[in-house]
Amino acid sequence: MSDGLEDDSFKTKRSLGTLVKAAATARSVLLQPPLNFSSVKRLIEVDEDTEEISANEECDDQLAEELVDAAADLSFTERQGSSEISVDPSASLATLFDKDSQDAKTLKPRLYLAWEMSDAPNICGILTACEFSRDDSLGTSKFSQSYMDSRGIPRLSANNCLLVDVVSSSGDPRGVGALLLISAYMTVFRSRKYEYLAAVAVSAPGKSLCERLGFHTHSFREGTQRQFCWIRAGELSAADLNRRLRVDSKLPAVCWRHGFTARTSHKRYARCG
């Protein structure tokens, strides 16, 4: 795409939102608005003994069955040296959306879903997120304020940071994981509360995704080699986003215009989205 996307005038909320919509449309993907704790807890049941999820039998919403099935289908395991690491949306849902857990409710979790719409609609991507907390289950137990200060990481807390717990998508259509991660970033960008989006990347695709989108990174070891990634609201550039999503090269000319006055002629304004 045109190098014009390097211009800072494309870093506005509306411009980034336009790029995300265009990339999703090109893939026949629908990005559902995030679901909160109350919306998800009515869909699933969490077994106290096995911590496995199932569809809530008292819920007549078809999404319940589809969510449970998709969470199982989108889990995967990969080998790193002599270790195996797992990305398991089902486990994340059980941790963050257990209706009997006060701790989970306090984290204000969100569920982002991507639907493939080219044939029969089906969930092709899942992202779970919550407010930042030091917790073993979130992979953040060592991130005390002193640890973050000594490694150049901002002082992240529940008051300023949304943390991605799991992001997982199918191989086709491509780029769904990136669309979901950027959707979480847009939640932060539009928020009056949050300043940062962060994630603990454990898989190779997850690490690569965050790096290519311009996240700051810190490598650490906790069982396996992991990468703590964070980005501040307003830092994600349209050019980085586009390099990952590759939207149509004609889009800038169609969806943005220059200002009409001498004072604004160097600026670009979104007219799509």
Image: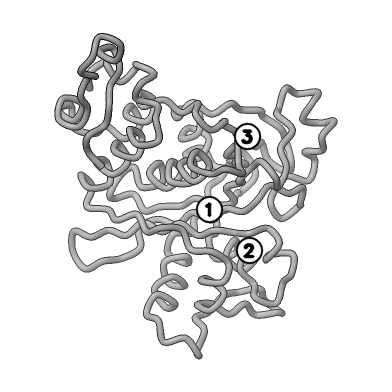
- The quadrant holding residue 126 is bottom left
Scheme by which the image is coloured: one colour
Image quarter in which the N terminus is found: top left
Q: Tell me the distance, in whole angstroms, between the alpha carbons under discs 3 and 1.
A: 17 Å
Give the residue type at disc 3. Gln
222 or 239, which lies in front?
Answer: 239
Identify which residue is drawn at 29% across, 56% down.
Answer: 30
Q: Secondary structure at mark 1?
A: strand
Q: Which residue is tagged 1? A: 77
Task: Assess whether mark 1 and mark 3 are in contact (beta carbons under 8 angstroms).
Answer: no
Image position, residue 269 (x, y; %): 27, 27
x then y, percent, for residue 143: 77, 38
Name which residue type carries label 1: Thr
Q: Is residue 133 above or below residue 35?
A: above
User: Residue at point 63% right, 63% down?
Assistant: 96
Q: Secondary structure at mark 2?
A: helix
The residue labelled by disc 3 is 227
- Earlier sequence position, callout 3 versus callout 1: 1
| Mark 1 crowdedness (10 Å alpha carbons): few <14, some 14-19, many ≥20 | few
Callout 3 touching callout 2 (CB < 8 Å): no
In the image, residue 194 lies at what x, y percent?
Answer: 60, 42
**Viewer-nearest of discs 3 and 2:** 2
Q: Is residue 186 left or right of residue 9?
A: right
Vertically, is 212 above or below 112? above
Secondary element type, mark 3 = strand
Report, in whole angstroms, how far the alpha carbon at label 3 lies from the one at label 2: 21 Å
80 versus 138 height, above or below: above
Q: Earlier in the sequence, mark 2 or mark 1?
A: 1
Q: Amino acid at mark 2?
A: Leu
- Rounded to the nearest angstrom, the CA distance separating label 2 from label 1 is 21 Å
